[in-house]
Image (cartoon, helix red, strand yellow):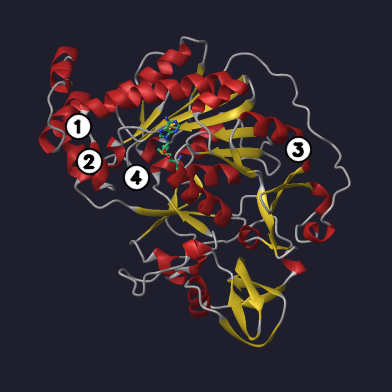
Amino acid sequence: MARSAKDRSERKTKPSVHGEAFEAHLQDLLGESSGALIAALGTVSPTSIRINPVKWVGPQASPIPWCATGRYLDQRPAFTFDPLLHAGAYYVQEASSMLVEQAVRAAGLQGRDVLALDLCAAPGGKTTHLCGLLGSGSLLVANEIDRKRRSVLQENLWKWGASNTVLGGSAPSDLKGLPSFFDLILVDAPCSGEGMFRKDPFAREQWSPALVEQCTLVQRDILQHAWNALRPGGHLIYSTCTWEEAENEEQLAALVDLGAVCVPVPVDPTWGMVRSTSPGINAVRSYPHLTRGEGFFIAVLRKPGEAAERLRSKHTEPQEHAQVLTWLGREEHWVLTERDGVLYATDAQWGPTLTTLTNALRILSPGVPVAERKGGEWRPHPALALSTALNKDAFQHIAVGRAGALDYLRGASLPAVEAKGTGLIMHDGCGLGWAQGAGSRWNNRWPTPWRIRAHQPSAPLVSWARSS
Ligand code: SAM
């Protein structure tokens, strides 16, 4: 039986944050089934990936039922030593969090061209997922407040090759300048992290009732700003990896009081998810003893009303940088923005929207970085080699197998006979990075911070042939 509210509040005052205190707390939340959950928290987490279908077919076996591109793997391989990971052919992601796909479907936005914001985006699991779920004519703002986490987000976005994404570094309060603006906002909120206890021992150490309390305040603030920035008729997807009602249902109840309507997220009973039982809230919870994944909570809210059609730019002005434009597929489709010696490309129809965004938010990467200025000339930017916007035919290809790709990813130059100009390193059909011809070798242009530094794999190497 779940304990009373009085018991709960007494427990909240206890200072202990580990083991027993948390287990007793779970019993408060879940009653008898807490035993099975605690046992599951002591088991090994399943390993799963999400395929980037624009770049790779990937293994077909062991699908994750709620995500078309999700796959379970039999074991956790040494991902670092797989060049396809670096090429953005897949993303290593926990399975329950791929429920975002069902949330986007529930909102009726799969394949639709919309203006979307992922407000708490790093390290980019859900942003990269959204890129494939929304229409290719969408504009997605991937925002992260934390500078260090933002650089990981940027790396993941560039590797994924998303061409419809801009990177932001704003605080939620900056959204005040964009009332009723976005069609979709994803708030994957910072939370007390209970659902990640199996996967992440640090989350377990961090937990305390005070942390839960603190998270509820942050979440309330984020949601308030997100709700104001959502256009009438727009959708908010809210998710956390905690089971705390105060961080989940109670946060949403405040928006329901403002007129939000909960849109049910479709889940098949065989998946093992649990529907939230709070009045007025239709949300989905996952628990590791019932579902093959970690703990997760997700809900979709619709803002009442209807929005006027968004104005999009239909024509592009004649542009400079004709040569750079030939590096992109569909040259006429892009508008280029120069900033700090880098040229960024965005779908031209979003040009005016990008200006509005840039005036209100801290936009750090206004589109795909296409070219960087070097010695008075433009040369292709590392992100372009990985981008789905790249016109691969504009460059000579240097095809490498696994060993050559790993050398390249470690920063080595590659042997050549008569290397000239800029070459595109290709692995398994995916663009990886640039190399500069220097006669008997190709000089390496893989970004230094991304280099593989480990020498020996500490787990079995990936063998996709075996998994497919
Ligand atoms: N959506 C990410 C993904 O799927 O890879 C995970 C996001 S993580 C659960 C929550 C993020 O919120 C963290 O990156 C954290 O830096 C950010 N965050 C923390 N405090 C915040 C705040 N006050 N406002 C906005 N974001 C915040």
The vertical placement of 71 against 84, above or below, is above
Residue at the disc numbered 1: 33
Residue 409 in the image, given as x and y percentages of width and height? 50, 71
Q: What amino acid is found at the position of numbered circle 4 in the picture?
A: Gly
Residue at the disc numbered 3: 351
Residue 377 in the image, given as x and y percentages of width and height? 75, 64
Quadrant including the N terminus: top left
Cβ of mark 4 under 8 Å from ligand 1: the answer is no
* Alpha carbon separation for disc pair 1 and 4: 17 Å
The vertical placement of 456 against 258, above or below, is below
Residue 204: which numbered mark, if any? 2
Q: Quadrant of ligand 1?
A: top left
Residue at the disc numbered 4: 293
Q: Secondary structure at mark 1?
A: helix
Q: Is residue 166 visible?
A: yes
Q: In the rendered structure, which disc, 3 or 2, sits on the residue that comes first in sequence? A: 2
Q: What amino acid is found at the position of numbered circle 1 in the picture?
A: Ser
Q: Secondary structure at mark 4?
A: loop
Residue 260 in the image, given as x and y percentages of width and height? 51, 15
* Alpha carbon separation for disc pair 2 and 4: 17 Å
* Alpha carbon separation for disc pair 3 and 4: 40 Å
Residue 424 in the image, given as x and y percentages of width and height? 66, 71
> Which quadrant holds residue 146?
top left
